[in-house]
Image (cartoon, rainbow, N blue to C red):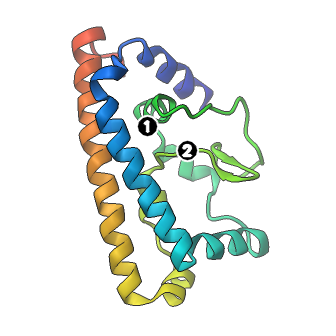
C-alpha cells in the first residue's frame, strides 16, 4: 500500500486542483449527506457496535479496492495517508476512529449487511442506496476528469 501512496503523491504533481475544485466540493457534499443520513438511521451505530463485538468487516483484502486515483482524490480533500497499518488483518486505511478515507471504495460505500437491513428497513435502505448511487456517480465523473488531466499533463503514469 505504501507504493500506491507514493505513486498517488507523484500523480498529485499532474493535477491542477483548481480546475476540479467544484467537482471535489460537490462530491464532498454528497458524501457528507450520505454519512449524515447513515448516522440518522443508525447505520453508523450498527457498524460501531459490530466492530466492537464481532470484529470489523474492514478486512485487509478490502484495501485491494483502493487504487492510486482513489488515494489521490482523498489527498485532494486533505486526507493524510497513514504511514503504517493500524492493526494486522484489517484494512490499511482503518484507524481506531474508523476509516480515514473520505472517498471510500465502492464496495465499502455500497455494502449493506443483513444486520443493517434489519435495523433500517426497506424504505430507508432505498433512500440510502439512492444517496450512495449519487456519490458513486460523482466520484466516477471526478475520476474521469483526473485521469484525463494526468494523461494530458504527465502522460500515462498510472
Rendering coords of residue 88 (x, y %): 76, 48
Question: What is the crowding at mark 2: few (fewer than 14 residues within 10 Å), some, or many (at least 20)?
Answer: many
Question: What is the crowding at mark 1: few (fewer than 14 residues within 10 Å), some, or many (at least 20)?
Answer: many
Quadrant the N terminus occupies: top right
The residue pinned by badge 2 equals 101
The residue pinned by badge 1 equals 70
Contact (CB < 8 A) between labels 1 and 2?
yes
Rendering coords of residue 46 (x, y %): 63, 76
Rendering coords of residue 127 (x, y %): 34, 76
Disc 2 secondary structure class: loop
Q: Residue at x 22, y 24 (%)?
A: 148
Eye-nearest disc, 1 or 2? 2
Q: Could you tell whether 117 is left or right of 91 in the image?
A: left
Q: Nearer the viewer, residue 30 or 114?
A: 30
Q: Is residue 24 above or below residue 104?
A: above
Residue 92 marker: none
Disc 1 secondary structure class: helix
Amino acid at each position: 500500500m505504501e507504493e500506491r501512496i507514493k505513486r498517488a503523491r507523484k500523480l498529485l504533481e499532474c493535477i491542477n486542483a483548481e480546475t476540479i475544485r467544484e467537482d471535489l466540493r460537490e462530491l464532498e457534499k454528497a458524501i457528507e449527506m450520505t454519512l449524515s443520513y447513515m448516522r440518522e438511521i443508525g447505520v453508523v451505530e450498527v457498524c460501531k457496535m459490530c466492530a466492537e463485538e464481532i470484529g470489523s468487516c474492514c478486512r485487509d483484502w478490502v484495501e485491494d479496492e483502493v487504487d492510486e486515483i482513489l488515494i489521490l482524490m482523498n489527498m485532494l480533500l486533505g486526507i493524510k495517508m497513514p504511514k503504517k497499518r493500524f492493526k494486522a488483518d484489517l484494512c490499511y486505511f482503518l484507524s481506531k476512529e474508523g476509516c480515514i478515507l473520505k472517498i471510500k471504495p465502492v464496495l465499502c460505500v455500497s455494502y449493506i449487511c443483513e444486520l443493517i437491513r434489519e435495523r433500517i428497513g426497506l424504505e430507508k435502505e432505498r433512500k440510502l442506496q439512492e444517496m450512495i448511487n449519487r456519490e458513486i456517480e460523482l466520484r466516477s465523473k471526478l475520476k474521469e476528469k483526473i485521469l484525463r488531466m494526468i494523461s494530458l499533463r504527465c502522460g500515462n503514469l498510472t
